[in-house]
Amino acid sequence: QSVLTQPPSVSAAPGQKVTISCSGSSSNIGNTYVYWYQQVPGTAPKLLIYDNNKRASGIPDRFSGSKSGTSATLGITGLQTGDEADYYCGTWDRSLSAGVFGGGTKLTV
Amino acid sequence: QVQLVQSGAEVKKPGASVKVSCNTSGYTLTTYATHWVRQAPGQGLEWMGWINAGNGDTKYSQKFQGRVTFSADAAASAAYMELRSLRSEDTAIYYCARGRRVVVTAIQYYFDYWGQGTLVSVSS
């Protein structure tokens, strides 16, 4: 049972747009920054978005992040088959003083 | 460039211990906390804790408290994770990750570089 809630899967056609939601609480998302990681099967996670909406080095502007209240959203436009991966939101829970993640969302293009 | 290179896969019996190493390069180990995250087969990411190689401070997730020990050798630019009393549920890929410290309402971390992962299999 993950602290943050994500949909298990999303899908869209190449060239389309998709959003992935991440829901938390006031002890985590509501009072901290949100981060997004991409994990291609068989590889380590890679940082995509930090501090809610900043793209990590080398990440194209097709990827965007936003946060409102206790929820966050990852957006991907111009979908490519290479975007197929698992996407995880993560943040810090101040009550637990611990890192927490969502359960991951599998993107199918 | 920043790199974290982990030790190879391990196969252990229940009750045994495992020690995974994380060799870093491209930055000073003592400047950043090293975090450990694990991923069971087909499951999501689970944060285990961190170590500050500069002063030896550690923070463990409550779930692993008493069963895990983080250590580091600053001169060797390496961090280590030892997990004891292994059980089948500990079968997972264990990742080390560099923690970037951010101060919002409190100190928090995110993970900007990750090791390639070490598969630990626990089976009788």
Image (cartoon, rainbow, N blue to C red):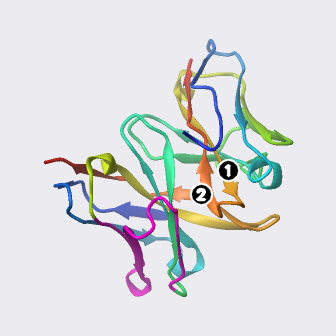
Name which residue lies at 86% across and 42% down: A69
Return the x and y of residue A38 as percentages of the image width and height.
56, 39
The chain that hosts pointer 2 is B
Name which residue lies at 50% across and 46% down: B45
Q: Which mark is residue A56?
A: 1
Labelled pair 1, 2 in contact (Cβ < 8 Å): yes
Q: Determine which residue is flagged by label 2.
A: B112
Q: For the magenta stretch, what is the residue range?
A: B56-84
Quadrant of the image containing the N terminus of chain A: top right
Give the CA distance from mark 1 to mark 2.
8 Å
Q: Amino acid at mark 1?
A: Ala
- Magenta stretch encompasses residue B14: no
Disc 1 is placed on an element classified as loop
Disc 2 is placed on an element classified as strand
Q: Which mark is residue B23?
A: none
Q: Amino acid at mark 2?
A: Asp
Residue B42 versus residue B24: which sits nearer the camera?
B42
Return the x and y of residue B122 as percentages of the image width and height.
22, 50
Q: Residue furthest top?
A: A13
Whether residue B49 appears in this view of the structure is yes
The chain that hosts pointer 1 is A
